[in-house]
Image (tube, grey):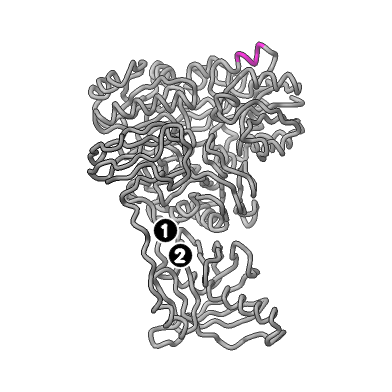
Amino acid sequence: MFKKILIANRGEIACRVIKTARKMGIKTVAVYSDADRDALHVEMADEAIHIGPAPANQSYLLMDKIIAACKQTGAEAVHPGYGFLSERESFPTELAKHGIVFIGPNSKAIAAMGDKIESKKAAAAAKVSTVPGYMGEIRDAKHAVEIANGIGYPVMIKASAGGGGKGMRIAYNAKEAEEGFGLAASEAKNSFGDDRCFVEKFIENPRHIEIQVLGDKHGNVVYLGERECSIQRRNQKVLEEAPSPLLDEKTHKAMGEQAVALSKAVGYDSAGTVEFVAGQDRSFFFLEMNTRLQVEHPVTELITGIDLVEQMIRVAYGEKLAFKQSDIKLNGWAVESRVYAEDPFRNFLPSIGRLVKYRPPAESVKDGVTVRNDTGVFEGGEISMFYDPMIAKLVTHAKTREAAIDAQAIALDSFYIDGLQHNVPFLSAVMQNPRWRSGKLSTGFIKEEFPEGFQPRKAEGEELKTLAAVAAVMDHLGNERRRGISHQMAGQAVRFAKRRIVKVGEASVALEVMGAVPGPFYVSILDKDMKPAQTMEITSDWWPGLPVWEGEVAGKPVSVQVRAIPNGLKLDYQGIQAPVYVYTAREAELAALMPVKAAADMSKFLLCPMPGLVKAIHVSEGQDVKAGDSLAMVEAMKMENILKAERDGKIKKVSAKAGDSLAVDAVILEFA
């Protein structure tokens, strides 16, 4: 077996590979750019080599620097992770010239399958069902429009060397096709060094289902079940699960066998993923093959018990697969949430900055439920504008889909992050969404379920009572702590009921709370006549200052994130974000009389919606604009975002220029 390998990547996937290598007794080498000097993967590896400036095209995308790092450290093999050089056909070829093993498929398989255009040609030749489209290279935007018109809208314009949602646009008319081609090509060039694109028919109301394959260098290939990745935003996967709630055994087997046949046809010899677009009727079409480890691989690992990174390393070393297709058994259900540094309240625009607090839920295996957190960050670290905004991948596994979702919901409620915006509130809300829970999914799920953008769920019904009860107990504990500090009633437990009015957002709950440390506590919800209507027993080890309240409410496990605000608390629970105030009856009367401060009117300004680099300003001072006109382009996290006018108007002042790095809410221009 290899004695030392180098990971040509960064972040959580580099940390993930290091964990398996360590388990196998293999030493590891990390590489890092200027931006990653203090990164977690650098700390975890046995050795680390600096390879250049922060931009990926000056560091992580340079093969000569990776090879030099291998020679310097004596690394015998390279694991590419995903993204960067993982699907670059020339990379394993260059490594081989220097006697270095590539932990991934052979270059011929990458050429046949890694290139999205060539993969569709190969699939068609192998009589695999494919989506209608134009498989040749597109010369320019005009050519893209001609092709799209011929196929019929909607169409998808996609980078040939793409992946991870980069270099991908959906067009519903000629104007969008022309604009989308330019954006897709530009993003592809920046992310992969290859601006080739292709066009195919976009299947409406589709589901995204992929088959995990694993092959060795002796002609053996197996499939490890499927993953459903239909919950997507801007063609970027957000939630994944395994297996799929759509497929029956017949379709599961047909897709798996087709994926294996295609893999064998191109001599595939590593972990890879054959992706399909599926109709609600279980019809399916080949979409592409990713010739690398997928971001969502943990859900497959949890339902099969197979470490895919370990298998990649063993295959690269020349070992045969130790199992046959008949040995693969699927066990239970797994759900993965991608935790991103992005603002769900601003259309999921990227967020960067320091992780002032980073407290993920504890990894565990208990009572048939597994909680796993794959991450590449740490408290005090920074999320950079130069790379993908992923913070972590939170994965839960249980016997059933419902149990896995419930475990995921509790784990998300325990996932505490401060210092930048993140999508945990959105993920928590999705876990409570009836359509998600029913498994009636499509790639349009987010747009259809949140047509006006994401806003926190409102606290209602039992969730309102739960939050009010927890807040009342926290206030009760705070009062007990203050009595201890001031030595008032020191050592005397307050066991008589305290009546409180708890305001959760706009709703109010009257209740009584009693109990003392160590508990339990009892909260009685009062009816309109101020008589107890429902009493809940509450147990918890929480004490003022802890960021997450964890305990049981009426026998149900509950986790609530806690943040202090003036005179109250901000609580996060199951996608609900609300300021919460616990009042006496007299305090509630006085609070109702307090004036509400109006927000400043910023409607005449175009503000930068996220931290980023201004790529272009499309207007000038004094220019008249119409609603929908492009005003500026801002790049963040390798994504180019066009800011458009929301109404007709005239430009009074332009405050930014191309090349400026702007903070969130910085003024770009002002309307007259």
- Which secondary structure class fits the magenta region best? helix
Q: Would residue 167 be found to the left or right of residue 199 on screen?
A: right
Q: Would residue 364 be found to the left or right of residue 431 on screen?
A: right
Assess disc 2: are there few (<14), some (14-19) or many (≥20) residues with their C-alpha within 10 Å of its C-alpha. many
Q: Would residue 426 be found to the left or right of residue 407 on screen?
A: left
Question: Which x, y percent locates residue 617?
Answer: 36, 33
Q: Residue at x 47, y 28 (%)?
A: 257
Q: Residue at x 53, y 54 (%)?
A: 412
- Under circle 1, the secondary element is loop
Q: Is any part of residue 1 visible from this angle?
A: no
Q: Nearer the viewer, residue 41 or 220?
A: 41
Q: Quadrant of the N terminus?
A: top right
Q: Residue at x 44, y 25 (%)?
A: 188
Q: Is any part of residue 198 visible from this angle?
A: yes
| Marking on residue 456 | 1
- The part of the image, by quadrant, that contains residue 3 is top right
Q: Report which residue position mark 2 lands on.
A: 578
Question: Which x, y percent locates residue 59?
Answer: 60, 25
Are the residues flagged by discs 2 and 1 in contact, CB closer than 8 Å? yes
Q: Residue at x 48, y 44 (%)?
A: 663
- Range covered by the magenta-colored residues: 93-97
Q: Earlier in the sequence, mark 2 or mark 1?
A: 1
